[in-house]
Amino acid sequence: MIRSTLALCFLLAIWLAGAALGLGERLGAKECEDLGFTGLALCSDCNTLAEYVKDEELVSDCRKCCSEDSDDSISKVLFSGAILEVCMRKLVFYPEVVAFIEEEKDEFPYLKVQYAYASPPKLIMLDGEGNQKEIIRIDNWKREHIRQFLKEKVKPGVSAS
């Protein structure tokens, strides 16, 4: 009895150590979507995100949901358009998003602002046919980060990679 208890404790310790070391840190599609990631982001994009957004938890979630970069592809995913979706009632809590919409949105003719009840601020990235390809939460982004991200990731007329 004591040996089986010790063996069980040993296996539990190994499992906990593996979890602590980050083994199996990938999240499922549903969990990633709930966090605002679709899994279409490349892991190198999470590094870029880390440069603009100093939220370690958000970057960690990105890395749990990203796809590994492949050597045979262009390491940047591009989109043809975007929708900035937010709840009009919640805008008061996101002054950076409000400032972007009021002062800089016109620089991006391929960006549509859409108001949806109870929606947190997010960018819905579109392919060449206008289909949704990725959703990115922008709750804590500054307006210059939104601007820079759109300039780098959205190229009208290209198919989403």
Image: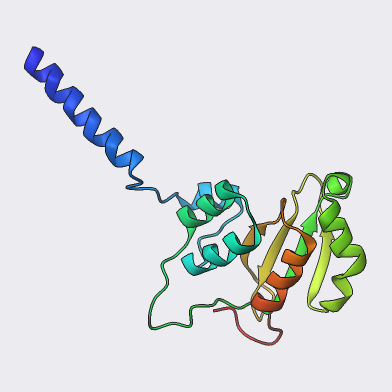
The percent coordinates of residue 84 (x first, y second) are 77, 63
Whether residue 18 is visible: yes
Q: Is residue 107 left or right of residue 25?
A: right
Report the quarter where the N terminus lies.
top left
- What residue occupies the far right of the structure in this picture? 102
- What residue occupies the far top of the structure in this picture? 1
Image point (36%, 46%), residue name: 22
Vertical order, 128 against 120 (above or below): below
Report the quarter where the C terminus lies.
bottom right
Image point (57%, 57%), residue name: 37
Image point (49%, 53%), residue name: 29
Q: Is residue 29 left or right of residue 138?
A: left
Image point (67%, 68%), residue name: 125
Q: Is residue 52 left or right of residue 44?
A: right
Vertical order, 83 against 95 (above or below): below
Vertical order, 35 against 146 (above or below): above
Whether residue 1 is visible: no
The percent coordinates of residue 34 (x first, y second) are 59, 47
